[in-house]
Structure formats: C-alpha cells, structure tokens
Image (tube, rainbow, N blue to C red):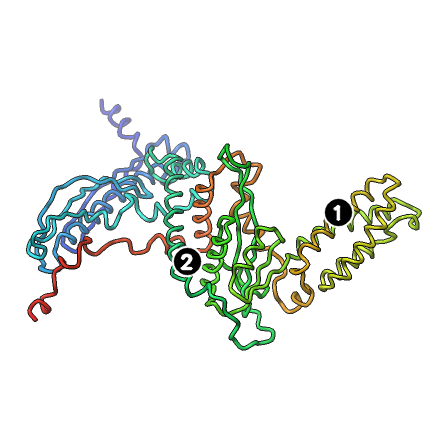
Amino acid sequence: MTIALLKEEATVAVEWTITIQGKNEFGDVSRREVRIDKSWERLFDGEVGLSIEEGKKIMAALQSVVVSHEAETYSLFRRVCPDCHTFRPVKDYTTRQIRTVFGTVEVRNPRWMLCRDCHPGIAGAFAPLKEICPDRATPELMELRLGSMMPYRQAVKVLAEFLPVEPTETHPTVRKRTIKIGERLDDQIAQEERRARPHETDERRQLEMHLPGDRRKEFVIRIDTAHVRSADPNSARSFELVVARCGRGGRGEPGGRYFVTSTDRTAIRDCALHALRSEGYRGFGDVTVISDGAEILKRLPRAMPKPTAHIIDWFHIAMKIQPMQQIADHLIRSNSNRAELPVTNGRDIKAVKWRLWHGRIDRAIRDLERLLVCLKQSQREGEFSISRLHSLGSQLLTYIRSNRGAIINYGKRYRAGFRVATTLAESAVNSLVGKWMVKKQQMRWSHHGAHMLMQVRTAALNGELRDRLRTSFRQPEPNMPSIFKPKPPLLRAA
C-alpha cells in the first residue's frame, strides 16, 4: 500500500501555484490561484519549462481576473454622479462578454439610472462598460493586424496556435472585424478630407521664395494601378485600384505615406491632398505626379491645385527600350554581313534613349521614325527578329507621342537630386496588393471588401493604425439635450 502511494505521488515531478492578486483605488481586492504541474514522463520527454498550452492557461486566468476587476472598478466609478457626488440608482445587472487577445471574459454589466436630483423628470439609463468597450472587444484585439497581413484562415490558425482564443474565433469573424476596422478608418479619413477640402482645393500659386537646389520644396506623388480579381460574376473579371505614395521630392528622403483608393477622379484627388497634408502641404508648393502614363492616372494632375506637373516614369520608358536593344544586339551577333542589316550596331537605339533621357523629344521621334522605315523595308526577308523589333519600335513611338507633354529632361532632374521613377509606387503595389490579390491567387474580391482591407493595410504601413483606432470614443456623460443638463453650483447660485 505504501509503495503504491509513493508511485502515485512520484507521477508529479514539479507543481506551481500562481497567485494573482489585484487591488483598486476603492480598496477592493481580487484574488485567484492557478495550479500548474508537470509529471516525470514529460520531463523524460525533454519538456522543460512552460508549454504553449500552460502559457495559454496562465494568461487566460490572468486576463479573466484583470478584466473583471477593471470592469467592476470602472462601473463603480461611473455610478458616482459628478454633480452631486451621490450614487446613481441601479437599473439592472446583466452580463457582457468581452473578447480579448487572451480569450473571452464574461463580466457583470450593470446599468445605472441618471441621477434624479440632477436630472429631474428624466428616466434614462446607461451601461458604463459600453463606454470603454463599445465593440465587445478590446482595442488591442481590434488592432491585431493578422487579418490584414495574411489570409483570414491562416490568421485564425496563428491565433489559435499561440493565444487562448475561443473556438468561435473563426475566419469569418476575423474577416468581419477587419472590414469593420476598414470602414471606421475610411469614415475618419473621409471626415478629415471634408474638413480640409474648402481650404486645399483652391487654385493657388507658389508664394514661397524660390531656393535653388531645395529638394524639399517639391511634393511628389508616385502613383500606379493594381488589378484585383473581381468576385462579382456580372462585372468584369478584374477591377483596378490606385496605389500611391506621397512625400518630398529628394532622392534619399523617406518614401512618404501610402494611400489606396478607387479610380474615381474625385477620390484620387481627395486622398492625394489628404496624404500631402500629412507631409506638410498647405496649398503652397510645387506638386509633381509621376506615373506610367495610364489614362486613369492622367486625371490626377488635372484635378490637383496649381502648380502641379505630370512626369512620365523613366523606368517604363527604359523598359520599353531595353528589349529593342537586346534584339538589335542579337541581330548583330548572329549575322556576319552587317551591311545588310537595318541596324548596323546598337547606336541608333542608344541615341533614342539618350535623347529621351535629356528631354530631346523631337529628335528622338525623328530618329525612331527613320529607324522604323528602315526596319519596314527589311521585313521582306521574313526574319522574325526584325518584325519584332519593328513592333516594339512602333509601340514606343506611340507611347512617346501620346505622352510627349510629360517627358522632361530626366538627366537634369536626376543630377539635381529629384526623383524620376515610380519605384516606391511599384513596391507599394507589391506590398499592399500583390501578395494577396495577384492573378496567381484563387481568392476573388468585391469592391467594398478590397477597399476596406486596403485601408487597414495602409494605416498599418503608415504607422497610424493604433492612433486612429484609439481615438476618444467614450462619452463622459450620456447624451441628452443641453436644456436638461444640470448647471454648476456657482452658476445656479448666481
């Protein structure tokens, strides 16, 4: 009998008792104990220290005590009338579930009546916990960016792996929470845009003193489009989102703020002005829009306050010339009789690129036209490389003609230290849209869902998600007409 008892006791190698005790300002004490034990078999298996499950158990118990104690403390604080400093009458007591990062906690949710002496004739009640937790979830759980940084199902798996969340924390819950946060952010930005619209959309001229070489004098918008697969069977297979970054003009300066919006002209302008205002723009200053020349993006420079310049991205021009240069080099290497080739060497194409880099558009167009004539005469031989070179040259000529007003002296601008490419916008498309919504992904999106998700992602990348979600949503007192609000004692005495 003694040997059996020793064997039973020997199954527990280590035992911990964690005591959690809290005390509030009113002197109330809350206490709870959590017991954790570990058997010899687990030690033999190499399980040293606390496991993830034991950590979940401890954090869930600690969170339950902390949330319950804080809820009771705040409810007791709000029961005291701030005018007469007496207790408000009790309406009733219910329960309320609060979702947190470390599990769901059920707390007592009282409702207090309005003070009868301070508000005579008004029978109103309010729940104090609704003031500090209107979403039935803590702000930290709402700010958790897993739903905006990875697929919803994967986000749920990560939450369940490391946090003591409830089984009801499913991917539809994460999706709804992310969309709700996006709607809240979208409403905040829309309100800020409406307040700033009368002051920033007026056409104003530059009134600052021109300082040569001042790169921070210029505000630059690098803008591009991204294609998203549509979930609507009655619409096109994909729709476009406008992705941009706004900042100062000098190379080496911080990239600036992100913003994502629809292709509507007014929406693009309002989002651009809102982002520029965060970078210090107040209606005075040179604004430069750098894009790839898409027709949708040409709407922004015409809608922005003056002076606003539009520049074609040099990267897109160079990428249209590069395959032509490669084909010309291939023709020269593969043909021994260079005299019969329309391009005896790569100087013709290099000359076009050099003239475009220095803003000599007319010379570049004439050289390109002469090259296309020579290529067309040589197409009778039926060589595919020459036909391909002629096709690429025709596309480049059309691109230059349609955007000749936005092609500048890139060399001069580059040497002055200004930006000449939309590299930051391209990277923004990859980081914001490309990982989730590219053509290789099977998931399809609605206009509303994609827009709201992008608002969360841009706020997270801009580093303002926490500040925007933690704005003061608590009303210090229940809303009521001003005629019924009590007057301060000194004013009533007067």
Classify residue 321 as left or right of residue 235.
right
At x 61%, y 62%, the residue is 419
Classify 10 Å Cα crowding around label 1: few (below 14), some (14-19), many (20 and above): some
Distance from disc 2 to disc 1, alpha carbons, whole Å, reads 43 Å
The quadrant where residue 31 appears:
top left
Find residue 144 and name its label.
none
- Identify the residue under disc 2: 193
Label tally: 2
Find residue 392 and name its label.
1
Residue type, mark 2 in image: Glu
* Residue placed most toward the observer, 301 or 248: 301
Image location (x, y in percent) of residue 135 = 29, 45
Image location (x, y in percent) of residue 434 = 55, 44
Classify residue 68 as left or right of residue 191.
left
Secondary structure category for the residue under label 2: helix
At x 93%, y 50%, the residue is 339
Image location (x, y in percent) of residue 345 = 85, 53
